[in-house]
Every structure is written in C-alpha cells, then in structure tokens.
C-alpha cells in the first residue's frame, strides 16, 4: 500500500532582499551557457575529473559513458536539454571593511541533474500568495509591504521539454502528428517524491499534449537486454522516446549493479535527447564547481565581463588533489582547527552526503580516509547567514524556531540545435527552502528542509 503526506512547508514566506534575488535571476542565463560550453569540451571534463575518478567508482563509471558517447561521431545526438537549478545562500554582511560589506548570494551548488520541486514550489508560491491576500492586514503589520514574485516554474519546465521534443522531431525528420512521441522520466524504485514529478507529467500533457511515461533503470534494462541502442532511436513499450528526463542516476544508489549501468549507457548512446546528457551531468559536479573558482578558469569559457559577474557568486573552494597546493594546505589546517567554517563535499547529489564538523576533521586528518580517497572531495568555506524565525509545518506538526534559507533559481537551456546563435533558454522560476539552525543539509525529500517562498523587500 502507498500512503501520502503533505509537502513540508513554511506557514508564511520568508523575507529576502529584492536586489539579491534579482542578481541571482539575472545571472541564471550565464550559468546555463557556462554549463553548455563546458559540456562541449569533454576533454576538459575528463582532465579535471581524472583524480576524482581514481578514487570514486561512480564518477569513473560516468566518465566511461562519456568516453563511449565521444566515440559515436555522427551517430551522437547533439541536441541537449538542461533543466538546471543554481542554489544560493545569503552571505550576511561582515562589516564595511570586510570581504562582504553588504549581504549577497553565494552559490552552494549548480544542479544539472534531477533539479526537483519545480512543481511543489509553484504550488507553495500560490498558497503563500493566498495567505498574504487573506491575512493582508496582519502580514503588513508584521512585515510591512512585501512583494511575492510569481513562480511559473512548472509551466516553464514543461515548455522547455516541449521545445526539446519539437527539436527532436525536426532533427530526426519525424512528423509529430503521425508519431506518438513521448518523454521518458527515469525514476527511482519506490520514488517518495512522486507528487512533484506527477505535476510535471500532468502539465506537459495539459499544456502541450505530450505524454510522459515513467521507468526505472531496471525496467529500461529489461526492454533493451541484448539490443544495441548505439545511434538508434529509442523505443520503450511501443512509445517513440524523444526526450529522456533523468530523476534518477545522480547517486550510486540508483546504479547498484551492471544492469542499471547498462541501462544508463543504452539511453546515452541512443538518439533520444537527454536531460541532462552525460556531459551536462558531469559539468555539475562539485569538482568542476571548485575548478571554475580558480583564477582565470572561467575565462576559458566566458568573456571577461561574464566571468567577473559569475565569480562574485563563488564561495572559497579548495582542491584536495595531491600534492596539495599552498592555499589548499592552509585551508585544510584552518578547517581542522575551525570546523564550523568549512564543509567537505563529495561528488554527490540528493542530500546527506557532505561531511561536517568532527566528521570532516577526522577525514582531513586522514583518520577515516586515505590521501587518495580524500582527492574525491572538495573543501568549501561555509556561507554565514543571518538566522530568522519561521514556523515550519511537517507531518501535521508546527515547529517554530530560528532558521536559515536557501534559494534555487531554475533555468532551461536547449543546446545543439540548428540555430546555435539564439539557443532557447529561459529563467524558469525559483525554489526556496528553509531549515532549522543546526541542520547542515538542505534537501526537502531527504528530510532536512521545508519548501518556502521569498517575500521581497
């Protein structure tokens, strides 16, 4: 049997500076273009991730698939769809003479695979708009005049998928009217976040008359057992798959055996458009994020003006590849003595993977891992936030406490089409998550945070 609970939410939206929110939305298109440009240079991905892959079988497996895709030549599907979400925390002001004289967003990570909650965040925004309207006088007395931005994330995500299906039909010479083109969503077995995913499925059908079907890696493997997909159109249970949308594959838990890996490989080698393609997936790893924060690295892909703008959103990050550079060695020593200032991040998504405080300290001191194993991580400075009071509703219970917030900006990017001069891209919407002080991770589905909305001032 299957049971459902309401999505964890805040009872009221949280105050956020309008200027910071605008800066994050304005830079979204630059981050999207950056990911696409990195993905078009697979040798860069391989070079940067080589040390990680020696000590992380998951990254090694992804790079092996990338290598096979590179060998396809003309059989390779060049059209790619990115549905990205760049996550930020608001660094508080540390004084007029400090590095942060005023509050500003710093990037936590750039999610290039399975950027979830576009559906539920849109619904929570409507709920909060209703509450502000219904209790306008009480809210104004407590918060003053606030502006709740519209959040059409779910409509825009579905629109981007429809554009990808149209691009596929054009590239493959398929008459959409005569062929029942579909989108396949690859999901985890026993998916707990199905409600958010279903909202996207229903919106895609309602707004664009495109069917979405769900399948696990294991189910895909059974359909393609012994059948080569290399450079061929992808069919699944009679449906012609134009686009594969991954909501699984971002963690080794989704790929526990060669069966699931072979399914992933089959999809990547097919003619279907992937969201994300393997190169987009790898471009969103923590190691790539850290590498881009190094001096002159962004200029390999962006002009000087855009590189300077993007760099403003980077927190301090340090490579742990051996031998350690002087800046990394200094940061490791500082992190061992001041564990509250740093976090140790592996090449993982989905929440619950980072190492904090004493657990991080022991790893850096090589008590719980070797030097070689440590190279699969990056060290990042923590973002210092100003706590605020919020009421959180989870499992029917209200908890009031001091909280921290994280804002994600969704963006879509359709690359590799005939018209590369004007690629389809759009700032899609936003997600805001709030968690109690002392909760290190920020995932909603993983139980650490609740869905919120920004009230701009």
Image (tube, rainbow, N blue to C red):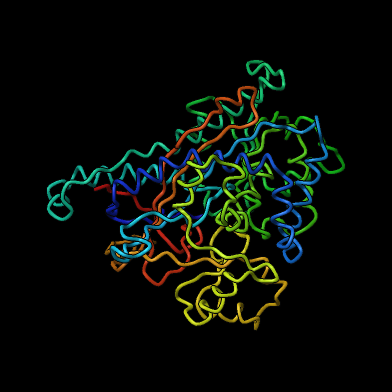
Vertical side of 457 occupied by 240: above or below: above
Percent of width and height locating residue 200: 50, 38
Q: Name which quarter of the figure residue 14 lies in.
A: bottom left
Residue at left offset 52%, top offset 51%: 193
User: Which quarter of the figure is the N terminus placed in?
Assistant: bottom right
Does residue 115 show up?
yes
Task: Please identify the quarter of the rendering in which residue 251 is found.
Answer: bottom right
404, above or below 298, in the image: below
Residue drawn at 56 percent across, 68 percent down = 379
Q: Is 321 rendered above or below residue 143?
A: below
Direction from residue 24 to residue 41 in the image, left or right: right
The answer to whether residue 263 shows anywhere in this view is: no
192 or 369, which lies in front? 369
Give coordinates of residue 179: x percent, y percent. Answer: 68, 20
219 displayed left or right of 385: right
Image location (x, y in percent) of residue 102: 30, 57
Residue at 57%, 57% (x, y): give it. Answer: 294
Residue 361 position (above or below residue 71): below
Q: How many marks?
A: 0
How far across and how far down the image is residue 399, in percent? Answer: 31, 66
Q: Residue at x 16, y 46 (%)?
A: 136
């Amino acid at each position: 049997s299957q049971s459902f609970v309401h999505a964890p939410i805040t009872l009221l939206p949280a105050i956020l500076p309008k200027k910071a929110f605008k800066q994050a939305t304005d830079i979204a298109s630059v981050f999207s273009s950056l990911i696409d440009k990195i993905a078009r240079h697979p040798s860069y991905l391989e070079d940067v991730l080589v040390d990680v892959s020696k000590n992380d079988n998951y990254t090694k497996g992804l790079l092996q698939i990338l290598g096979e895709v590179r060998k396809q030549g003309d059989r390779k599907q060049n059209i790619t769809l990115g549905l990205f979400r760049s996550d930020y925390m608001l660094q508080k002001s540390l004084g007029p003479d400090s590095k942060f004289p005023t509050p500003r967003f710093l990037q936590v990570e750039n999610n290039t695979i399975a950027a979830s909650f576009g559906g539920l965040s849109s619904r929570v925004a409507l709920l909060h708009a209703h509450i502000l309207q219904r209790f306008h006088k009480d809210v104004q007395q407590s918060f003053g005049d606030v502006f709740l931005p519209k959040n059409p994330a779910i409509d825009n995500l579905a629109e981007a998928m429809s554009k990808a299906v149209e691009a596929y039909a054009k590239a493959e010479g398929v008459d959409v009217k005569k062929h029942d083109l579909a989108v396949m969503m690859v999901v985890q077995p026993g998916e707990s976040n199905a409600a958010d995913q279903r909202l996207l499925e229903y919106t895609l059908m309602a707004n664009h008359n495109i069917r979405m079907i769900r399948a696990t890696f294991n189910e895909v493997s059974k359909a393609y057992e012994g059948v080569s997909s290399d450079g061929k159109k992808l069919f699944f249970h009679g449906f012609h798959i134009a686009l594969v949308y991954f909501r699984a594959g971002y963690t080794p838990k989704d790929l526990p055996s060669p069966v699931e890996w072979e399914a992933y490989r089959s999809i990547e080698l097919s003619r279907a458009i992937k969201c994300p393609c393997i190169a987009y997936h790898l471009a969103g790893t923590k190691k790539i994020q850290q590498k881009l924060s190094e001096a002159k690295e962004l200029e390999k892909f962006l002009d000087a003006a855009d590189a300077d703008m993007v760099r403003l959103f980077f927190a301090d990050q340090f490579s742990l590849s051996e031998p350690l550079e002087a800046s990394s060695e200094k940061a490791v020593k500082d992190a061992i003595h001041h564990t509250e200032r740093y976090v140790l991040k592996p090449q993982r998504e989905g929440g619950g993977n980072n190492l904090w405080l004493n657990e991080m300290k022991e790893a850096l001191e090589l008590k719980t891992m070797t030097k070689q194993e440590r190279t699969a991580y990056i060290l990042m400075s923590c973002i210092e936030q100003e706590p605020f009071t919020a009421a959180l509703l989870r499992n029917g219970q209200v908890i009031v406490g001091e909280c921290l917030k994280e804002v994600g900006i969704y963006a879509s990017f359709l690359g590799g089409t005939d018209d590369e001069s004007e690629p389809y891209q759009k700032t899609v919407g936003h997600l805001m998550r709030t968690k109690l002080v002392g909760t290190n991770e920020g995932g909603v589905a993983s139980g650490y945070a609740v869905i919120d909305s920004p009230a701009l001032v």
